[in-house]
Amino acid sequence: MHTNKQGWIEADEAGHTSDPKVFAIGDAIKLGLVTHAIGHGRKSADAIHALLSGRSYYMPAPKPMVSYDKIKTSYYDICKGEHFKPKTEANRCMSCAVCRDCKMCEATCYYSAISRKDTPDGSYEYVVDENLCIGCSFCAGICPCGVWEMVENI
């Protein structure tokens, strides 16, 4: 199997790799949310079924998005006491922006601007030393939970 410069397995939209017997999806091809992996898995399952059935696989046309005004808000928990905003909640699907303590942000920060601090109540928090942070956004890019957010300096 071929890998890219970052070490991720190269695969097409259906998960086909350079080895016809191997499919790669989810975090094997790039970091993402569980919903990304589920979507990749569904496409790969369709491709594998087509392969085993002896027919060729064609990527189906993307389904249209459900308009925000048709979303039933009663199915969603409101996070952090905010008013329900469908566009915001849709982006948090399967990842409620709560840190899973994977330490990826801390490990990725070249200048050690991010550190984990234990709090007296037994919980933890990750903090940024603004004197060390260069704004590279690696932490935001690698976080599987969407905890880190980059803002423009003013």
Image: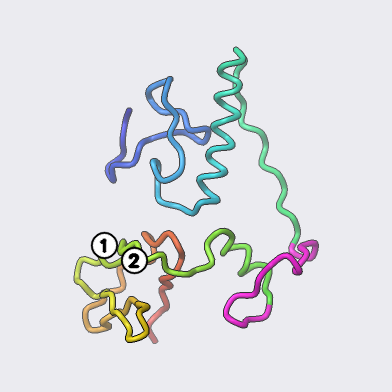
Queried whether the magenta region covers residue 147, the answer comes back as: no
Whether residue 76 sits left or right of residue 9 in the image: it is: right
**Residue drawn 26% across and 82% down?**
129
User: Is 28 rendered above or below residue 116?
Assistant: above
Q: Residues within 10 Å of mark 2 (few under 14, many from 20)?
A: many
User: The C terminus lies in which quarter of the figure?
Assistant: bottom left
Amino acid type assigned to the residue bearing label 1 in the image? Thr
Of residues 40 and 116, the one drawn nearer to the viewer in this rendering = 116
**Residue drawn 35% across and 78% down?**
125
Queried whether the magenta region covers residue 69, the answer comes back as: yes
Q: Which segment did they paint magenta?
A: 68-83
**Residue drawn 57% across and 16% down?**
52
User: Is 131 rendered above or below residue 35?
Assistant: below
Amino acid type assigned to the residue bearing label 2 in the image? Cys
- Residue 53, quarter of the rendered image: top right
Whether residue 53 sits left or right of residue 18 in the image: it is: right
Cα separation between marks 1 and 2: 7 Å
Q: Secondary structure at mark 2?
A: helix
- Residue 89, quarter of the rendered image: bottom right
According to the picture, the residue beneath numbered tag 2 turns out to be 139
Q: Earlier in the sequence, mark 1 or mark 2?
A: 1
Of residues 25 and 103, the one drawn nearer to the viewer in this rendering = 103
**Residue drawn 56% across and 18% down?**
51
According to the picture, the residue beneath numbered tag 1 turns out to be 108
Of residues 49 and 57, the one drawn nearer to the viewer in this rendering = 49
